[in-house]
Image (cartoon, rainbow, N blue to C red):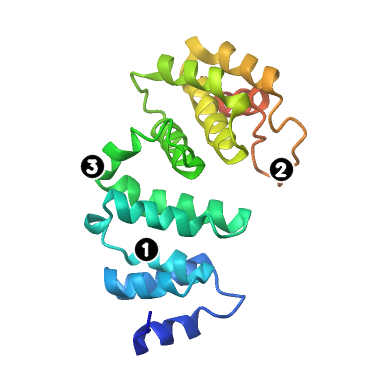
Amino acid sequence: MKLSSKAKNILKQIGDKNTKLGDLRKIAKEIKKDHQLAIELWSAEHFLARLLAILIMDKKLLIDEVIDDLVSDINQHDEKEKLQLIDWLMANQLTKDKKILALIENWVNNPTSLKRRVYWYYQGRLRWMGKIQSNSEEVLSSIEKQIENEEPEVQWAMNFTAGWIGVYEKKYRNRCVKLGEKTGLYKDKMVSKGCTPEYLPEFIAIESNKRNL
């Protein structure tokens, strides 16, 4: 795709390795919504350009086929970039539109692992502020059956969801703790100072104690 002078100038601005996410948000705030510019930036195949593109997309134009193309492109990035892009897309666009949320609800068994990650991460995000959901029994049962056979990027989102169910819904707490003990996921993973371990027994104990639950 031939880039406009505006797109070229922006790419020069964010080409520095010291560019931070906050810098991208400042640029996006100035641009506001510009879907055509977003497509140009996305076509550059540059990680930071794609993060910025996501911020200025028009969510009303993100129909199923367009999302498929975006996910396919994201899958071409390395693991760290791929996960940051898909989570950024989910948080800044996909969960902002009711029609897209309806699509996400059907991604639980989608053949594409990144779409399954979005489904499970969305389930977790619904709960992490303490909003109890009516389908927690069904969600937890699905996690128990599937998590050990899932792709790592999906396992993380399932584990995240089980963690917040265990924190806020006491009747499921023991099940969530036992799930963590059974899978052993993230048991020996080092975490930065001040961060909560992702191993479910520790995560649930720490986060529930913080909230006196």
Q: Can you identify the residue that label 3 sits on?
A: 98
Answer yes or no: is residue 212 visible: no
Marks 2 and 3 sit apart, C-alpha to C-alpha, by: 35 Å
Label 3: element kind: helix
Q: Is residue 34 left or right of residue 21?
A: left
Q: Position of residue 111 (x, y in %)?
A: 46, 38
Q: Alpha carbon of mark 1 to alpha carbon of mark 3: how far? A: 18 Å
Q: Residues within 10 Å of mark 1 (few under 14, many from 20)?
A: many
Q: Nearer the viewer, mark 2 or mark 3?
A: 3
Q: Earlier in the sequence, mark 2 or mark 1?
A: 1
* Residue 114 position within the rendered picture, expressed as x and y whole percent measured from the top left: 49, 44
Q: Is residue 67 above or below residue 1?
A: above
Of the image marks 1 and 3, the number of the one nearer the N terminus: 1
Residue 15, picture quadrant: bottom right
Residue occupied by mark 1: 55
Q: Is residue 18 left or right of residue 100?
A: right
Looking at the rendered image, the disc whose residue lies closer to the viewer, 2 or 1, is 1
Q: Residues within 10 Å of mark 3 (few under 14, many from 20)?
A: few
Q: Amino acid at mark 2?
A: Val
As shown in the figure, which amino acid type bears the numbered disc 1? Leu
Q: Of residues 92 and 117, which is closer to you in this image?
A: 117
Residue pointed to by mark 2:
191
- Vertical placement of residue 106 versus 63, above or below: above
Cα distance between the residues tagged 2 and 1: 29 Å
